Amino acid sequence: MNTVALLPHGEHLLPQGRLTVVISRSCDIRMVTEAIADSAPFALGMIDSNTQPEIVTNIPAIATIVAIKDFNMENSGLLEITIEGIDKISISSLSMAYDNLLTATYEHHYNWPSIEIDMTNQILADKLKLLFLSMPEISQRYPQPNYQDATWVCQRWLEILPIEIKQKQALIYQPTADITINFLLQLLQDHNLINSLK
């Protein structure tokens, strides 16, 4: 069985996605330090934003192996890292070290294959492009966005949409992005969606 250190976080991150995270807990600093020293990945597991990482006893089944792309120290002395999603994993169990660092046993979960953007789903790419223009803190993570790939577009939508964890996980669990494409097309008919994200 595979094992990996796990960072509980209030956001999903999927393959090819990027996220900037401030690391403050000593156990997470240890995890990041070891990851940098050994060029080793760790995993990001989504938790409810109201949950304190110190009391996490379970994580939704699907998490994402991530790699550190950049890091720096903030003026406050906290460590800030930019991570990129690599592979989805299915968590089997969790254990907690003496300093509250979580370790997950897992199996590899299939990444979605690419799906070419076409006339039926072009609106998903167009709306995401508009949303990114209004949210430079997100768009700057992607100097080369892949708006021609519906899978890439869907994964970016799932990362930022304010929907319940269980609903996101149900979509992420699917073998392809097809169901998510249909879900997003229906959701985008609600004209208030984009405004709620800004």
Image (cartoon, rainbow, N blue to C red):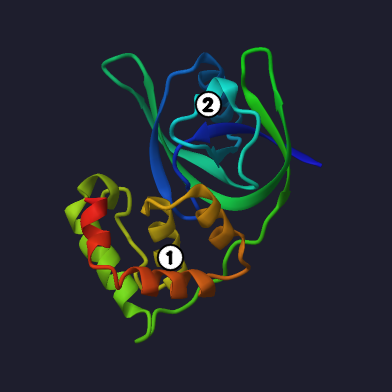
- Whole-percent x and y of residue 195? 20, 56
How far apart marks 2 and 1 lie (CA) works out to: 28 Å
Q: Nearer the viewer, mark 2 or mark 1?
A: 1
User: Can I make out residue 33 in this image?
Assistant: no
Residue for point 45% across, 75% down? 182
Q: As shown in the figure, which amino acid type bears the numbered disc 1? A: Cys
Q: Nearer the viewer, residue 156 or 61?
A: 61
Horizontal side of residue 76 vs 60, given as left or right: left
On the rendered structure, is 149 left or right of 123? Answer: right
Which residue occupies 65% across, 29% down? 57
**152 and 182: which one is in front?**
182
Query: In the figure, 20 relative to 148: above or below?
Result: above
Residue picked out by circle 2: 32
Secondary structure found at label 2: helix
Q: Position of residue 198 (x, y in %)?
A: 21, 50
Q: Earlier along the polypeptide chain: callout 2 or callout 1?
A: 2
Query: Which amino acid lies under the numbered mark 2 shown in the image of this protein?
Result: Val
In percent of the image, x 61 and y 65: which residue is there? Answer: 174
The answer to whether any part of residue 26 appears in the image is yes
Q: In which quarter of the view is residue 118 placed?
A: bottom left
Task: Report crowding for label 1: few under 14, some 14 to 19, many 20 or more residues within 10 A (C-alpha).
Answer: many
- Provide the residue designation for mark 1: 154
